């Protein structure tokens, strides 16, 4: 966040400097307000570029085995450009490298799910997925696992067939 702020300020100073040099080179024919307006527009442009590049930068730096299951796009009135090109504000990733299941329950998986958000800390949940019955549950303190792989105390949810989290965990 701090480096992005420095980049925005630097862009403003750089563009204002270029406009002042250009004005000096052409004999002071440009209006005086052009340098601060150009600096402000440059700062807004760098901020927008940083917001739009956040998702691709974060996804590119995900560790091996972390697979993006869902991306949440945002359209905001105070960001009118997002109605043309939606902004990816957050996403959900599943750690496929640590996916576990019991040999006697091959359709049930235990997965670590990570929630990433712009300007938000990363949060993590352990999720149970029952691919045979197409349902999922969050592992809570009441959840118990037996020796034969049976699960008790889970609050199962039956999502629609196009649920991205279950689709990712169950392999499509």
Image (cartoon, rainbow, N blue to C red):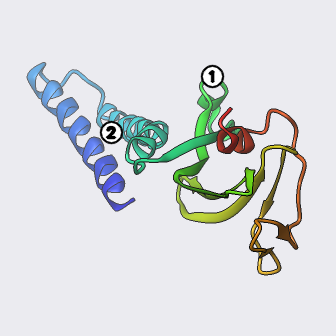
Residue closest to the eye, 15 or 64: 64
In the rendering, at what x and y percent does residue 108 appear? 75, 53
Q: Which label number is shown at residue 39?
A: 2
User: Which residue appears at 74% of the width and 43% of the height?
Assistant: 166
Q: Nearer the viewer, mark 2 or mark 1?
A: 1
Looking at the image, residue 79 sits to the left or right of residue 29; the answer is: right
Element under disc 1? loop
Label 1 belongs to which residue?
84
Compared to residue 24, the image places residue 11 above or below, namely below
* Contact (Cβ within 8 Å) of mark 2 with mark 1: no
In the rendering, at what x and y percent does residue 16 appear? 25, 38
Looking at the image, residue 41 sits to the left or right of residue 139; the answer is: left
From this viewpoint, is residue 90 visible? yes
In the rendering, at what x and y percent does residue 142 appear? 83, 80
Q: Kindly give the residue lying farthest to the left in the view shown.
A: 25
The part of the image, by quadrant, that contains residue 156 is bottom right
Element under disc 2? helix
The C terminus sits in image quarter: top right
User: Which residue appears at 82% of the width and 66% of the height?
Assistant: 150
Residue closest to the eye, 24 or 85: 85
The N terminus sits in image quarter: bottom left
Which of the marked residues, 2 or 1, is nearer the chain's N terminus? 2
Mark 2 and mark 1: span between their CA atoms? 24 Å
How packed mark 1 is, by other alpha carbons closer than 10 Å (few <14, some 14-19, many 20 or more), is: few
The part of the image, by quadrant, that contains residue 79 is top right
Looking at the image, residue 21 sits to the left or right of residue 132; the answer is: left
Compared to residue 51, the image places residue 147 above or below, namely below
User: Which residue appears at 39% of the width and 41% of the height?
Assistant: 60
How packed mark 2 is, by other alpha carbons closer than 10 Å (few <14, some 14-19, many 20 or more), is: many
Compared to residue 127, the image places residue 13 above or below, namely above
User: Which residue appears at 90% of the width and 48% of the height?
Assistant: 158
């Amino acid at each position: 966040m701090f480096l992005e702020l420095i980049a925005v300020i630097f862009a403003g100073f750089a563009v204002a400097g270029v406009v002042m040099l250009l004005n000096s080179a052409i004999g002071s024919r440009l209006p005086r307000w052009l340098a601060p307006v150009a600096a402000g527009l440059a700062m807004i442009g760098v901020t927008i570029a940083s917001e739009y590049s956040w998702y691709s930068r974060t996804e590119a730096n995900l560790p091996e085995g972390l697979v993006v299951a869902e991306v949440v796009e945002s359209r905001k009135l105070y960001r009118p450009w997002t109605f043309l090109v939606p902004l990816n504000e957050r996403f959900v990733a599943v750690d496929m490298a640590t996916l576990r299941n019991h040999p006697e329950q091959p359709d049930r998986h235990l997965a670590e799910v990570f929630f990433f958000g712009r300007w938000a800390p990363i949060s993590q949940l352990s999720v149970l997925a029952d691919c045979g019955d197409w349902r999922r549950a969050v592992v809570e303190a009441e959840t118990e696992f037996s020796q034969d792989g049976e699960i008790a105390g889970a609050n199962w949810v039956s999502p629609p067939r196009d649920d991205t989290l279950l689709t990712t965990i169950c392999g499509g």
